[in-house]
Image: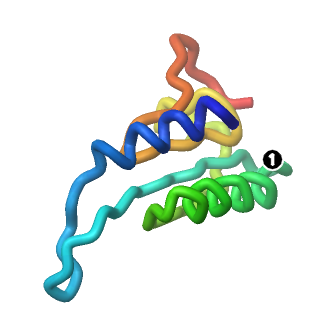
């Protein structure tokens, strides 16, 4: 969790700016990929929402249930895999899905 929180904190400083109805807001995009049988979604949602609330960060959050083939095509390394603004928070040399 500390690694995810540290990266989220870093991304808050480096996030892009998007315009909505004339207002400029910091928007972080969080994509979470989970295997079909992964049981981590509930806790993951709660942890991310807690961190975003604590830091008062606005984010677009997406959760995807994918199979092994899709995970390999996307280059994901495990379940859950979390990408913040398109970057994996736990990059690794080995590709695969667990």
Few, some or many residues within 10 Å of mark 1 (<14, 14–19, 20+): few
Quadrant of the rendered structure where residue 76 is? top right
Indicate the colouring scheme: rainbow
Q: Residue furthest bottom?
A: 21
Residue ID at (20%, 72%): 24
Which residue carries the number 1 mark? 38
- In the image, taking residue 5 as reference, residue 47 lies left or right, namely right
- In the image, taking residue 25 as reference, residue 58 lies left or right, namely right
Residue 43: x and y in percent read 80, 54
Q: Residue furthest top?
A: 93
Q: Residue furthest left?
A: 22
Residue 59: x and y in percent read 45, 64
Quadrant of the rendered structure where residue 5 is? top right
Judging from the image, what secondary structure is the residue with disc 1 in? loop
Q: Measured along the vertical axis of the image, is residue 24 above or below residue 69?
A: below
Residue ID at (44%, 67%): 58
Q: How many marks?
A: 1
- In the image, taking residue 49 as reference, residue 93 lies left or right, namely left
In the image, 49 versus 39, the foreground residue is 49
Residue ID at (14%, 84%): 22
The N terminus: image quadrant: top right
Q: Measured along the vertical axis of the image, is residue 51 above or below residue 98?
A: below
- In the image, taking residue 40 as reference, residue 77 lies left or right, namely left
Residue ID at (64%, 50%): 66
The C terminus: image quadrant: top right
Residue 61: x and y in percent read 52, 63
């Amino acid at each position: 969790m500390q690694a995810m929180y540290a990266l989220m904190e870093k991304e808050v400083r480096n996030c892009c700016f998007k315009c909505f109805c004339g207002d400029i807001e910091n928007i972080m995009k969080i994509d979470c990929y989970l295997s079909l049988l992964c049981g981590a979604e509930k806790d993951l949602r709660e942890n991310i929402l807690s961190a975003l609330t604590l830091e008062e960060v606005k984010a677009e959050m997406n959760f995807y249930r994918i199979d092994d083939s899709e995970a390999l095509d996307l280059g994901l390394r495990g379940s859950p895999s979390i990408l913040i603004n398109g970057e994996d928070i736990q990059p690794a040399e080995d590709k695969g899905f667990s």
